[in-house]
Amino acid sequence: MPLEIVRNDITKMSVDAIVNAANTSLLGGGGVDGAIHRAAGPQLLEECKALNGCRTGEAKLTKGYRLPAKYVIHTAGPIWQGGQQGERELLEACYRNSLELATKYKCETVAFPMISSGVYGYPKAQALQVAIDTITRFLLEHDMTVYIVVFSKEAFEISSKLFNDITAYIDDVYVDKHLHSPRESTRVRLQSKYLKEAKAYARKDTAEYCSTPVLADLNPCANLDEMLNQVDESFAEMLLRKIDEKNISDAECYKKANIDRRLFNKIKNSPSYKPSKQTVLAFAISLELTLEQTKEMLEKAGFALSHSNKSDIIVEYFILTKNFNVIAINQVLFKMDLQPLGY
């Protein structure tokens, strides 16, 4: 995915560049800054001394030395003073200048910490939103994979109102999968088994097969050749049709879906390619499909929405509230330890 939130130690990220939430001296400090200097070794400090510091919002680049990353991009974030002293603009500049520097050095993968959200006091939910807004704007014009790295779930905050609303919605509609009737589940499995058997025999002499008692009621072989010749629209065909109907470009669609260009091209050029459910849902959100249209698109790829699946309920909530923002959905999924959309 072009933008992904991950739980990790940023000093362990194997990327082209990691970003250091530095102080203006660039001579090391506490938190992420201190951890990066310790992991990189003393040569990092020696190179930093030659940079003559870094003003708030600016970014400067050094080698990564002992780090898995090739480069370290140092940026000095703003200290929170209530939000009326240009803090947002300065924090945006940290992300924007770091990304532009990464582009200059041909970096394809970059990992950011949550700049200014530690001892500098920037409210975590607001700091995260600034990061996401700035990075997503940049990715609309550039092909790059960007990670926002948080050390623990406790350090990750989203809007409490949004989180509470979604939690309440889940409580209203969630159906425990263990409540399904065993008899019903067995019947569904048996029907599925018989239909698979029927398909296996589809192009053989089926007269004797179709007369067997177990399949008599299902009657799968009547007009089966005719049915097989009326194959429905595929997922890829529906996706491309919807892009045309929405009058948007392919790039607009896959970037809004937070899907990598290479994956989109694989889907577009390989009719037999089977996307994941998370990929299908990302495209449905990107195209701002209704709930029924989303279900139809999922069906084309062999999936369905289920109230026994919390991820599905969260996606349903966003669709019903017309909040077609894949990144916002992924923030909630990350907070709840669920797989994000877009793979």
Image (cartoon, rainbow, N blue to C red):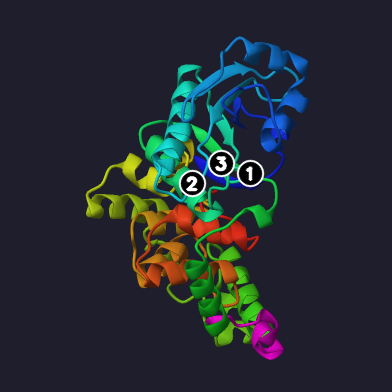
Give residue 327's position: percent from left, percent from top.
47, 52
Name the side, left or right, on which 138 lies relative to 44. Answer: left
Q: Amino acid at mark 1?
A: Val
Q: Quick one: label 2, few (<14), some, or many (20+) residues within 10 Å? A: few
Residue under pointer 2: 81
Give residue 50's position: percent from left, percent from top.
61, 9
First reached walking from the N terminus: tag 2 or tag 3? 2
User: Rounded to the nearest whole Å, what is the CA distance between mark 2 and mark 1?
Assistant: 12 Å
What element does badge 2 sit on? loop
Q: Which circle marks residue 119 in the picture?
A: 1
Residues in magenta, as a range: 173-185
Along the line of sight, the residue nearer the viewer: 143 or 119 = 119
Q: Amino acid at mark 3?
A: Ser
Q: Amino acid at mark 2?
A: Gln
Residue under pointer 3: 116
Along the line of sight, the residue nearer the viewer: 225 or 175 = 175
